[in-house]
């Protein structure tokens, strides 16, 4: 009862917030809206969720009805209830993603995984003689979703994406009825060669985001009582609690919720008074929030200017240091060049002197040595 009351109050606050002019928050006009194709993709994908819930619940109830007279009825009924609980929770996680493309790919992968799980995977023996009903329902959901997205994807891309789904299911099969799995979107980006930073460029405008949140709240408010009821029924199935009493309690909660909605619909004066009170109470808070935001923005602007000045000063100091180092390097280069020239000329002078001495010795050896030897031999022979 408390959960339903909180959800009703939250939904009421959302409705009042959208209708109250003082609660409007103007954002900067830099937000890109979602493309029309992705908006249509989001609408039709979420419409598929209602068909998913209907088919799963109808098939699970049929399995429970047919298994009541069998010895393994408790086992089959437990599996049918868990199928309703965990499959619908898994669908909520996949279909209510911020990116419509991610939601479409992941929901498609979930339907294919469910077909494989009940057809030939770990869950092929969970429903006994009623297994064919579950397999048929799972295949029907997959075909229905593929038919839904045919209007958004070209034939070539559809074939390519179907190949990815088949490969993903083979590599990531479901292993238990809790449908523990990881999102297929990142694997799809890798398969398609798309950079993850370029995959999602915008989450939509403010009205689109608010509409997305409203859809999620509405779906949670609709599914939460049913899931709580199924979990209670599952608990009662394995305990001594009377299921009829639980059903009566759930019916009482549903009736109370219905009367509360009727009261809201039949009391517009009270709703108007509540809206006025909320406007009066929330206006100072919003004004304080606006003032605080302005102060923070002004402080951020001052800090940015100080940072720009510091960077400018550092850059000027760096330029001066580089200029000084350049001048010092140029002076050192002149000294080094002069010293190099002096050393080269000294070495060149020594080399020239050595060559001259060697040349004189060469002349003495080549020309004067034979002449002296001849004179010496001639004198020796004359004696």
Image (spheres, rainbow, N blue to C red):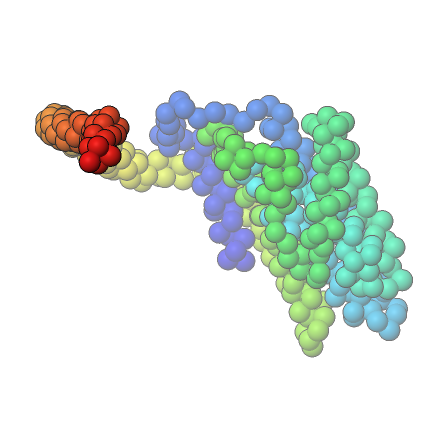
In this view of the protein, can residue 53 be seen by the observer? Answer: no
- Estimate the x, y position of residue 345 in percent, counting from the top left: 14, 26
Total labels drawn:
0
Relative to 205, is 256 on the left or the right?
right
When asked about the image quadrant of residue 357, the answer is: top left
- Above or below residue 278? Residue 374 is above
Q: Indicate the quadrant containing the C terminus: top left, top right, bottom left or bottom right.
A: top left
* Nearer to us in this view, 2 or 320: 320
* Nearer to us in this view, 91 or 383: 383
Residue lying furthest front in this view? Answer: 383
Residue lying furthest bottom in this view? Answer: 240
- Estimate the x, y position of residue 279 in percent, counting from the top left: 35, 35
When asked about the image quadrant of residue 195, the answer is: top right
- Above or below residue 111? Residue 246 is below
Q: Indicate the quadrant containing the N terminus: top left, top right, bottom left or bottom right.
A: bottom right
- Above or below residue 260? Residue 129 is below
Relative to 327, is 90 on the left or the right?
right
Residue at the image position 62 percent from the left and 59 percent from the top? 228
- Estimate the x, y position of residue 270 in percent, counting from the top left: 44, 39
Residue at the image position 64 percent from the left and 28 percent from the top? 40
In this view of the protein, can residue 106 be seen by the observer? Answer: yes
Residue at the image position 60 percent from the left and 28 percent from the top? 39
* Nearer to us in this view, 368 or 132: 368
Residue at the image position 31 percent from the left and 40 percent from the top? 281
- Estimate the x, y position of residue 326 in percent, counting from the top left: 15, 27
């Amino acid at each position: 009862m408390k959960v339903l009351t909180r959800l009703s109050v939250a939904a009421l606050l959302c409705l009042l917030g959208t209708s109250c002019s003082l609660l409007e928050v103007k954002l900067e006009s830099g937000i890109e809206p979602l493309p029309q194709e992705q908006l249509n993709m989001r609408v039709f994908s979420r419409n598929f969720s209602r068909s998913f819930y209907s088919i799963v619940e109808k098939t699970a109830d049929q399995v429970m009805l047919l298994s009541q007279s069998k010895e393994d009825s408790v086992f089959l009924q437990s599996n049918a209830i868990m199928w309703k609980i965990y499959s619908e929770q898994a669908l909520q996680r996949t279909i209510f993603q911020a990116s419509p493309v991610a939601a479409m790919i992941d929901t498609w992968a979930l339907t294919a995984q469910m077909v494989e799980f009940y057809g030939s995977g770990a869950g092929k023996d969970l429903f006994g003689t009623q297994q064919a009903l579950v397999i048929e329902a799972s295949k029907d959901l997959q075909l229905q979703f593929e038919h839904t997205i045919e209007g958004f994807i070209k034939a070539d891309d559809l074939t390519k994406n179907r190949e990815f789904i088949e490969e993903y299911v083979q590599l990531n099969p479901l292993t238990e009825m809790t449908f523990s799995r990881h999102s297929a979107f990142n694997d799809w980006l890798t398969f398609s060669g798309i950079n993850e930073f370029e995959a999602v460029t915008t989450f939509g405008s403010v009205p689109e985001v608010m509409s997305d949140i409203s859809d999620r709240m509405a779906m949670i408010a609709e599914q939460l009582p049913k899931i709580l009821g199924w979990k209670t029924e599952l608990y009662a199935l394995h305990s001594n609690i009377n299921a009829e009493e639980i059903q009566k309690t759930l019916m009482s909660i549903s009736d109370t919720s219905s009367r509360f909605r009727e009261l809201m619909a039949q009391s517009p004066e009270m709703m108007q008074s509540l809206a006025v009170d909320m406007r009066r109470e929330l206006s100072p808070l919003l004004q304080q929030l606006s003032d605080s935001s302005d102060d923070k923005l002004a402080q951020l602007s001052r800090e940015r200017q100080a940072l720009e000045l510091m960077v400018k000063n550092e850059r000027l100091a760096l330029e001066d240091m580089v200029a000084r180092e350049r001048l010092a390097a140029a002076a050192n280069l002149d000294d080094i060049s002069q010293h190099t020239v002096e050393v080269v000329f000294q070495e060149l002078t020594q080399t020239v002197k050595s060559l001259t001495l060697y040349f004189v010795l060469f002349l003495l050896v080549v020309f004067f040595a034979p002449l002296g030897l001849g004179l010496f031999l001639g004198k020796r022979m004359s004696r």
